[in-house]
Image (cartoon, rainbow, N blue to C red):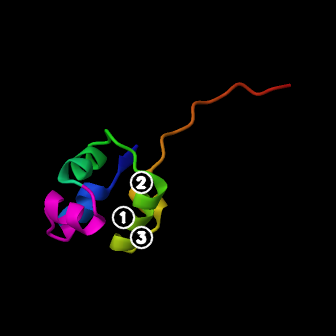
């Protein structure tokens, strides 16, 4: 899942470690989130959204659903 986490974090002048401390996760988790290797569980996504004062949808971009053939 793509996201704007790195941009938001850097905009506040925070390191990955500083963000991790505020979220109660490891720096490696923040790195995995930023690089799209890890999708957060809903409670973590809510903590991130609250921390940055934005809705979850403004931070995380859901992948496009593949087109499915119409049923008749």
The earlier-in-sequence mark between 2 and 3 is 3
Q: CA distance from mark 2 to mark 1?
A: 10 Å
Mark 2 nearby-residue class (10 Å; few <14, some 14–19, many ≥20): some
Q: Is label 2 in a helix, a strand or a loop?
A: strand
Q: Tell me: 59 left or right of 68.
A: left
Q: CA distance from mark 2 to mark 3?
A: 10 Å
**Residue underneath mark 3:** 54
The earlier-in-sequence mark between 2 and 1 is 1
**Residue underneath mark 1:** 48
Relative to 48, does residue 69 appear above or below in the rendering?
Answer: above
Q: Is label 1 in a helix, a strand or a loop?
A: helix
Image position, residue 52 (x, y; %): 34, 71
Q: Residue at x 24, y 56 (%)?
A: 6
* Residue found at the far right of this picture: 72
Main SS category, magenta section: helix
Q: Which mark is residue 60?
A: 2
Q: CA distance from mark 1 to mark 3?
A: 9 Å
Evaluate if marks 2 and 3 touch, with contact meaning CB atoms under 8 Å apart.
no
Q: Nearer the viewer, residue 14 or 24?
A: 24
Residues shaded magenta = 11-25
Q: Nearer the viewer, residue 53 or 28?
A: 28
Evaluate if marks 1 and 3 touch, with contact meaning CB atoms under 8 Å apart.
no
Image position, residue 54 (x, y; %): 41, 70
Q: Residue at x 16, y 65 (%)?
A: 18
């Amino acid at each position: 899942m793509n996201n704007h986490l790195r941009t938001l974090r850097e905009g506040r002048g925070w390191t990955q470690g500083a963000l991790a401390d505020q979220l109660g996760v490891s720096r490696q988790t923040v790195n995995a989130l930023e690089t799209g290797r890890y999708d957060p569980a809903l409670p973590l996504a809510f903590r991130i959204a609250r921390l940055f004062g934005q809705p979850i949808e403004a931070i995380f971009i859901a992948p496009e659903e593949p087109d499915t053939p119409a049923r008749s």
